[in-house]
Amino acid sequence: MIVPMKHLDLVCLASCREGTLRRLRELGVVHLDLASSSGDAVVNAKAKISDAEKAVRIIRKARAGEMCDVRARSVEEVLAIDADRETLKTERDRLEREIKRYEPFGDFDPVLAQELLSKVKGLTDVVALPEKLPSMRLSRLREKYDRVVNRINIDTAKLAICDDMAILSSFPALAESMAFEQAKELLQDHGAICVISGWIPVSKLPALMGEVRNAKADLFERANSLGWGVLVRDPAEGETPPTLIDPPRLFRPVKALFEGLGIAPGYTEADVSVPFMCYFALFFAMLVGDGAYGAIFLAATLWGWKKYRAQKGNALMKAWLVMLTVFSSATVLWGLLSNTWFGAQIPYFNSWPTVKWLADPSYNNMMLLCFTIGVSHLMLARIWNGICKINDTSAIAEFGWAGILLFMYFVTNSIVGIFSSIPQVMFYVFGFSLIAVFAFTVKPSELKSRGAELGMLPLNIMSALGDIISYVRLFAVGLASVKVAENFNSMAIGLYSGADEWWLKAIFALLMALILVLGHALNLAMAGLSILVHAVRLNTLEFSNHKGISWAGYAFKPFRKIKEK
C-alpha cells in the first residue's frame, strides 16, 4: 500500500534551530524539500562533495589499475598536486611546440645569433634562421622539457599512492553535512521562533508527538529546551506529498528496484509492488532464456550473499541480493522447463512435457504463452481498478475493459494463426464490454469536460490490441539469445573439428574456449540490456497504462543520518 502522509509545520525556538534539526535528523521521520535549498552554505557543502569525487577520479586515473601501497592524503592535497601537474602539462606542451619549431635549425646560440644579426645586414639571406629566435638553445629547451616531464611523473606517482578509499569513506559525512545545511536554509525565521515544513507518514506521527510532549515538559525545567510545537494537517488540494510504499514483507525488496530505476508511483496511485516483482521475475527468466546463464547469475548472487554476511552489508544490498536470487532462480527454472543450457540441450530432459511443448517448431506455443502472459498482466490491472472502484459506476467500465482485452487476446492469436477462429461467445463478450466502457467511462455530468475520451475509444481499443501483441518480445528476445548462443557453439565446434593433427587440435581447442567464453559473455551482456529495456517497459508502460500508474511521484526520503555503506 501507499502510506498516508500528513503535512507538518514544526515550530521551535530560534535559539534552538540547530538542536531542532539534529533531533529531527535523529528521529528520521520527516521528509523535507532539501532540493529547494541553494544558499551559500549549501553551495559550499556541494562543492566539498564535488571536490571529493574529483579527487577520487584523479587518483584512480593516475593509478590506472596498478596495485601499490597507499597513503592517506586530504582532498585539498590531492587537488593541489593535480593542479600543479596540470600547470606542468601546459608548460610541457609549450616546450614541445617550441622544440619542434626550432629543431630544423640545429642547436645554435640565440644570443650570439641576435648579435650577428644586429651587426651584419643581410645575414638572413645567407644563413637560414627563424624569423623569431628561441628563448634559449635547443639543448637547454630539451633539458627543461625533460625536467618538466620528470616533475609530471613525480606528481602522478604521488597521486597514484593516495588512498581513494579513505576519501570515499568521507562521503556519508559530507552528504550529511550538506543535508543539514539544506535543512537549516528551510527554517523560516519569525522573530523568536522558527518554522520548518515537511511531510510525515501517519504511522510515524506517534514518535514525533511523543518528542513534542517531551519538549513541552522540559520547557519549564531546562533553559535550553527546544520548545517544539506542531501543526499537522491533511494534504491540501494541489499539494503533492512524497510517496512511501509499504508492500508485503516478501515483496519489499522491489523498493530497491524502484529506487534504482528512479521511479515512484504518484501519491494518489496504487502500490503495484507485488505484480511488478512477480511479472518482472517471469520476464527476467524468459528474456535471458537460458538456464546456464541463470546459474551464473545465481552463483554470483550466492557469492554476494557471502560478502554481505562477512561485511555486514546494509538493507539496500540485502534487497538487491534477495531480488537477484529470485530472478536468477526463475531463470534456472525456465532453463529446466525449456531445456536450454548455453544454447544446447541435455538429452535427458527432452522427454519432459514442457520441453516438448515449448520446442514446437512453428513457435506457436511460445507465442501463445507470451500472449497469455500479456493478457493476464493487463486484465489484472483492469480488474484491480474495478475492485478499487466497486462503489462507483466507473467500475463497470473497468470490467468492460477486461472483457475487451480478453477479446483482443483471441483476435491476436487468430491473426498469427495460433487459433483457427474466434469463439462465437467472445463476440458477445466484446459487445457487452464495449457498451459497458462507452456507457460508464464518463458520467453524464462529466460529458463537457471528458467527452473527448469517448471519441478516442476506437483508438484505445486498437491500442489494447497492440499492447497484447507487444508481449511477443518475450519470445523474440529470448529466442534471439538462444540462437546467438547456438551460433557461437557451432562456430567453436566447427573450428575444432577442422583440425587433424594433435597440435592443431590443441591450438584450436584454446581458440574454441576463447570463442565460447567471449561469445557467451557477450550474450550475457545483451541479456542484461534486454532486461533493462523490455522487462521494465512491460511493467512501467503497458501494465501501468491500464492500471493508471503515471510514475510521476517522488520517493519519501526522510531527513536522517546517513548510514555508511
Image (spheres, rainbow, N blue to C red):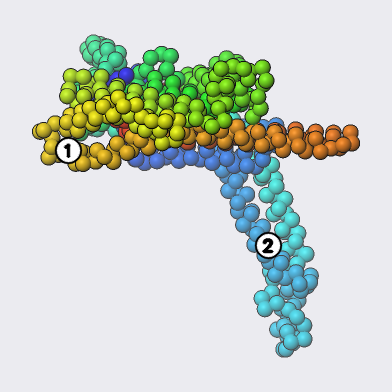
Disc 2 marks a residue whose amino acid type is: Leu
Q: Residue drawn 63% across and 20% down? A: 350
Residue at the outermost left position: 445
Q: Residue drawn 51% across and 19% down? A: 326
Packing grade of label 2 (10 A; few <14, some 14-19, many >=20) is some
Residue 483 vertical position relative to residue 20 in the rendered view, above or below:
below
Which of the two residues, 319 or 526, is positioned nearer the viewer here?
526
Mark 1 vs mark 2: in front: 1
Q: Any mark on residue 364, and which?
A: none
Q: Residue drawn 68% across and 36% down? A: 488
What element does badge 2 sit on? Answer: helix
Which image quadrant is residue 439 in?
A: top left
Which of the two residues, 68 or 325, is positioned nearer the viewer here?
325
Q: Any mark on residue 95, and which?
A: 2
Which image quadrant is residue 373 in?
A: top left
Which image quadrant is residue 553 in?
A: top left
* For the residues bearing labels 1 and 2, Cβ distance under 8 angstroms: no
Q: Residue drawn 72% across and 89% down? A: 121
| Count of marks overlaid on the render | 2
Residue 309 vertical position relative to residue 445 in the rendered view, above or below:
above
Estimate the x, y position of residue 405 in percent, counting from the top left: 32, 29
What element does badge 1 sit on? Answer: helix
Which of the two residues, 227 or 170, is positioned nearer the viewer here?
170
Disc 1 marks a residue whose amino acid type is: Arg
Q: Name the residue under label 1.
A: 450
Residue 370 placement, left or right of 458: right
Residue 406 placement, left or right of 236: right
Packing grade of label 1 (10 A; few <14, some 14-19, many >=20) is some
